[in-house]
Amino acid sequence: MHPFSILLLLSSLIILVVPRAINRRDTRPRAAYTLDNDPAGANILALRIDLEDGKVSPPVRTPTGGFGLIGNTATGPSGPDGTFGQNAVVVFEDYLFTVNPGSDTVSMFSINVDDPTDLSLVGQPAPTLGDFPMSVAYSSALKIVCTINGGAKNGVTCFSADHVKGLISLDSSPRPLSPYLSQSTPPVGPPGTASDIFFNPASTALFAVVKGNAGTTPPTPSTYFVWPVVHGSVSREAVVTRIPDLLINFGGNFVSDNILASVESTFGVALLKVDPSLELTEEVHTVVPNQVAICWSVYAPRFDAFYAVDAGTGLLTAINPRTGAIKGQFSYNAAEFGFPLDVAVDRTSMYILTTNASVAVISLNGSNSGNVPTLAQNLDISEGGSKKLFQGMAMYPS
């Protein structure tokens, strides 16, 4: 069986994406990163990206200086999705940031611009003042890093990012997420766990997401926390929004200054508008056909598409970031290559971290002219760690 099949919703949707004009070829060295969330000692795996074909090379391991920790499900230790959310690893400018859930710290690395697999720890891992940090955000405008603690002692803690000293705490205690988040350490999920943290494009607010629970009576909505940035600092008081039909929400990506494309595992994708008061309203509700558990997402401006990724089927859905309309869907043979754990896009390639301890590289070349996205590579990275411990996917340059 061919690993890919296109599911055309209408014959007119054979064009999945429309690339933006590219003025010049980007020849900067490139790399992909994932976290080996190992309780015995966490590591970042860095995979060099070939500039010609987008394929990745075997990973280079760099210790984070901290320890991993795996969340639980109702029946025992979690499977491959050990942190229940997005952005365990992020890259901005020439720096990489990652969480250490088992040691309750965050690490900052500088990236060698000539060899981005060469990472150097900046300072020491910084305590998050809570339990089980699982997602991290950075604002290059503010030089501020924030993380969400998803364990028994929950909350959001922020740091200044110094290129010499590393991470310096800006808080004496986390911004509380209770009563909307009430967990153990490690947490039990995915329902009722922390999902994601990120700044808006203008760095005027910090957003965090906590999942609800579709299995309660009545269902419990997910919760969005938004902290305004005042005079260059993240405030302590959050604006809280709960949208009734967002139940198992995994966060998402800003697709414009005030529109957030959000992935919801109970139906698909929602476009949320952020109003001046920082409250959110659901502008578009997109039900994705055949979806089982949409958990991961990536916004690719070059292709004018927001990709929603189904962890349960391997189905990838291209969404119009302005209207929420489905532009097209394609799937890969996830039963053979592994189900998706996270996703990123660099230039014309999509990189999928899989449950089979591999990175699947999908070429999007020619998608705008009707060509089927093709599997360019499926690299086994199991020698870099256990397949049940890999978490997150980030790219350099970001």
Image: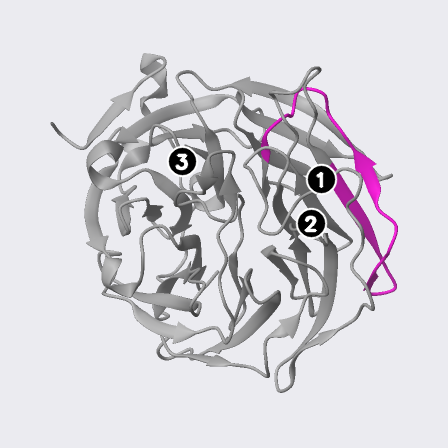
State yes or no: residue 129 in magenta: no
Query: Which of the two discs, 1 and 2, labels the residue nearer the N terminus?
Result: 2
What's the magenta region? 224-249
State yes or no: residue 234 in magenta: yes
Q: Residues under labels 2 and 3: Cα distance?
A: 25 Å
Identify which amino acid the numbered label 1 is placed on. Answer: Asn
| Position of residue 392 in the picture relative to residue 54 (left or right) | right
Q: Which residue lies furthest to the bottom in this view?
A: 164
List x then y, in percent, for residue 252.
Answer: 58, 40
For the residue carrying disc 2, how many other residues have a C-alpha within 10 Å: few (<14), some (14-19), or many (20+)? Answer: many
List x then y, in percent, for residue 253.
Answer: 58, 42
Foreground pick, 176 / 378: 176
Q: Name the residue under label 3.
A: 18
At x 39%, y 54%, the residue is: 389
| Residue 305 in view, yes or no | no
Q: Residue furthest front?
A: 75
Label 2 near label 1: C-beta < 8 Å?
yes
Callout 2: SS: loop
Residue 258 is labelled as 1
